[in-house]
Image (spheres, helix red, strand yellow):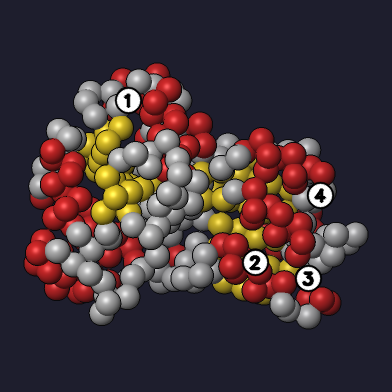
Amino acid sequence: MADRQISKLNCGKLGLIVGGGDLPLHVAQIAAAGDIPIHAVNLLGLAHTSSIVSNGDWIALGSIGGIIKSMKSANVQRICFAGQVSRPDFSTLKLDLRGVKELPAILHAASKGDDALLRAVIAIFEREGFMVVGADEIATDLLAPIGPLGAVLVDAKHSLDLEKARAIAENIGTLDIGQGAVVCNGLVLAVEAQEGTDAMLRRCLKLPAHLHGTRSKRAGVFAKVPKPTQETRIDLPTLGLQSVQLADELGLAGIGYAAGATFLLEKDAMREAADKAGLFLFGLER
């Protein structure tokens, strides 16, 4: 982590709202290495039950008042959201009194899309006096670098698919649909929606074999970029080792992602797996 990031954030305890996946663990580890004390609120049903942050409070997603109370009791001034939180079924969501109060505004925002929903959630905490910081302000080492990450380079043929996949990802992002797209030989195989990256890649595996590459003859590219109006303090794109493994299984030639705006979890393992498979990892300049 850059020293300036540590000095910027190391002024009191950091509240970490923990969702699913491995990102919260990485954020907590980096914060600890920078002597930033953490108060974790783990979201029930989403957060891992065994990690270095699992000794914090465990609170339901709809208990907004409970989360705020926990943070204030720990004298938290800054809050970081980390991890996956899928859009809930609001009709069955168990709410506390504060959650009931905020529900109409949340539902109104949700009707406009995920980005509006995330901004509404952030606004609740900001009205309570908290400063919401992005995980990228803490875990700077996890951000994707510009250019090739491994030994495999993008050739002219695959660069055409990469540019098309990127353009499609940016366009669906404008409509607040998703962050990624798969293109093979100019043909759009899939766009990412609510299911997420890995589920989208698994969906591509069900397509006829002639539509995508193979491990012996790689073809096609997956690109993932932030939405143009994305609330990056909560929902920055994230890729991990499993994404590389699925791209390998699909026979893709490589993966492109927004440099400086994508978390790469297990970066070294991703690079090693990509090099072994013969597919590229490439950070796209924004």
Circle nearer the N terminus (3, 1): 1
Q: Which residue carries the number 2 mark?
A: 201
Question: In the image, what residue type sits under mark 2?
Answer: Leu
Q: Residues within 10 Å of mark 3 (few under 14, many from 20)?
A: many
Query: Residue, x 85% and y 59% (percent of image)?
Result: 215
Label placed on residue 212 = 3
Measured as percent of width and height from the top left, residue 154 is found at 75, 49
Task: Measure the alpha-carbon separation of dots 4 and 3.
Answer: 16 Å
Task: Work out whether residue 247 or residue 92 is closer to the camera in this orientation and state it.
Answer: 92
Nearest the eye: 32 or 145: 32
- x 17%, y 35%: residue: 74
Q: Earlier in the sequence, mark 2 or mark 4?
A: 2
Q: Give the structural element (helix, strand or loop) at label 1.
A: loop
> Amino acid under label 3?
His
Say which mark, if any, is on residue 36.
Answer: 1
Return the mark for residue 277.
4
Badge 1 amino acid:
Ile
